[in-house]
Image (tube, grey):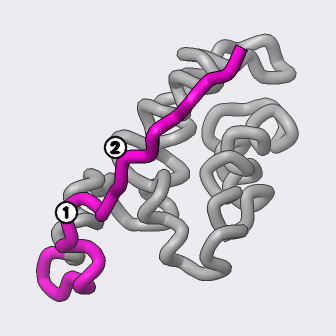
């Protein structure tokens, strides 16, 4: 679903115009630029992403009809429309534990100390 289609769905549910809501749906889906496919959802389409949306956009948006609409409800609708439910970040991350790449298991990195001399 595109951000605009999500915004149309939100407008049908809460009133107002899709343009009242599209900025929130754009934010959820802007991570497509990193993956180009459905896997982008792991970055914001979860319970923490819903809270991040509230942090970014505030608790409510006022639509073009003058009605305050909770951002939480808009964000939950977006995630549910795409995922069918609201996953947690752990729902995505637990899949990594089943077949981790070697680099994921590496702790730390090799470092070296360099002496710095300051001349006046």
- Of circles 1 and 2, the one toward us is 1
Label 2 environment density (alpha carbons within 10 Å; few <14, some 14–19, many ≥20): some
Q: Position of residue 53 (x, y in %)?
A: 54, 33
Q: Which residue is mark 1?
A: 107
Residue most toward the left?
98
Q: Main secondary structure of the magenta part?
A: loop
Instruction: State the residue at coordinates (30%, 63%).
Output: 110
Q: Looking at the image, is 44 positioned above or below residue 33? A: above
Instruction: State the residue at coordinates (18%, 87%).
Output: 99
- Left or right, 42 with respect to 23, comes to left
Q: Which residue is mark 2?
A: 47
Instruction: State the residue at coordinates (54%, 16%).
Output: 59
Which quarter of the figure has residue 71?
top right
Q: Position of residue 87 (x, y in %)?
A: 29, 56
Q: Looking at the image, is 14 positioned above or below residue 114? A: above
Q: If you read the primary sequence from the N terminus, does the residue marked by circle 1 or circle 2 appear first?
A: 2
Q: From which residue to which does the magenta span run?
A: 97-120
Image quarter in which the N terminus is found: bottom right
Q: Looking at the image, is 68 positioned above or below residue 87? A: above
Label 1, secondary structure: give it.
loop
Q: Is residue 117 magenta?
A: yes
Q: Is residue 25 magenta?
A: no
Q: Position of residue 27 (x, y in %)?
A: 68, 46
- Left or right, 49 with respect to 25, comes to left
Instruction: State the residue at coordinates (29%, 53%).
Output: 89
Label 2, secondary structure: give it.
helix
């Amino acid at each position: 679903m595109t951000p605009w289609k999500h915004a149309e769905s939100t407008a049908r549910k809460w009133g107002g115009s899709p343009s009242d809501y599209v900025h929130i749906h754009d934010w959820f889906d802007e991570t497509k630029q990193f993956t180009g496919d459905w896997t982008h959802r792991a970055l914001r389409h979860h319970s923490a992403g819903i809270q991040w949306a509230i942090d970014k956009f505030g608790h409510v948006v006022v639509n073009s009809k003058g009605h305050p609409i909770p951002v939480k409800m808009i964000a939950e609708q977006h995630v549910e429309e795409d995922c069918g439910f609201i996953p947690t970040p752990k729902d995505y991350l637990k899949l990594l534990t089943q077949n981790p790449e070697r680099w994921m298991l590496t702790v730390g990195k090799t470092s070296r100390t360099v002496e710095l001399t300051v001349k006046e």
